Image: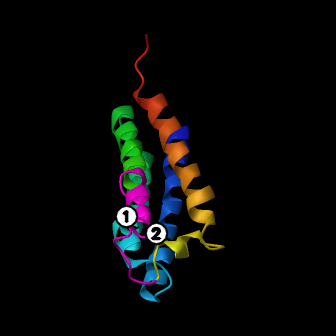
Amino acid sequence: MTPSQAFILIQVLRIAAIGGLYKATQGLMPAVFTASVGIPDFLYGVSALILAGTAYYKRVSSRLLGLWHIAGIAVIVMTAPLIMQMSLPGSWYIFQNLPDGRALLEFPMVLAPTLVVPVFILTNAIVAYHLLRKPL
C-alpha cells in the first residue's frame, strides 16, 4: 500500500457520519445540520472507498488526489460553521427546531467537532499541500 492510498483509506472513516443520520431520524440531532453536513460527509467517505479501490488497481494522478483532498476540506468547512451558528441561540438563530445546535455540544457528540473532524481536515490539508505544491 502506498502512502497516498493510506491517506485515502483514513478518509473512509467518514462513512461513520451515517451514525449522525441515524441520530437525526431518532430526533437526537438537528436535521438541518445532518442534511447539510452529515450527508455530504458520508458521501465523501463513500468516494474515499471508491478512490482507494481505483488507486489500488491503477495510478491516480497527484493533482486529482490533491483536489479530492481539497474537496474533503470543503465538505466540512464550507457548511458546518455557518449551519452550526444558525442553529444555536443568538442573533443568527434561524433553525429553531428542536433539537437545535446545542445537541452537538453535549457529550459524547461534542467529540466529533472538537477532535475527530479537525483530524480529518488537517489530514486533508497536509496531504493536499504535499500533492499540489510546485517545486521552486
Q: Label 1, on which residue?
A: 92
134 shown above or below 14: above
Task: List the single residue furthest toward the front.
Answer: 91
* Residue 125 spot, x, y in % from top left: 48, 39
Asked whether the viewer can see residue 115, the reply is yes
Q: Are marks 1 and 2 in contact (CB under 8 Å)?
A: yes
Q: Which of the two residues, 59 or 61, is positioned nearer the viewer here? A: 61
26 shown above or below 46: below
The residue under the point 40% across, 29% down is: 132
The residue under the point 53% across, 51% down is: 120
Residue 94 part of the magenta-drawn span:
yes
The residue under the point 56% across, 60% down is: 113
Q: Residues within 10 Å of mark 2 (few under 14, many from 20)?
A: some
Cα separation between marks 1 and 2: 8 Å
Residue 64 part of the magenta-drawn span:
no
Q: Which of the two residues, 32 or 131, is positioned nearer the viewer here? A: 32
Say whether residue 26 is left or right of residue 115.
left
Q: Label 2, on which residue?
A: 88
The residue under the point 49% across, 82% down is: 23
Task: List the single residue furthest toward the right.
Answer: 107
Could you tell me what secondary structure mostly forms the magenta stretch? Answer: loop
Say whether residue 106 is left or right of residue 50.
right
Q: Looking at numbered disc 1 in the image, what kind of residue is underneath it?
A: Trp
34 shown above or below 44: below
Where disc 1 sits, the SS reads: loop
Magenta segment boundaries in residue numbering: 76-98
Q: Looking at numbered disc 2 in the image, what kind of residue is underneath it?
A: Leu
Say whether residue 117 is left or right of residue 44.
right
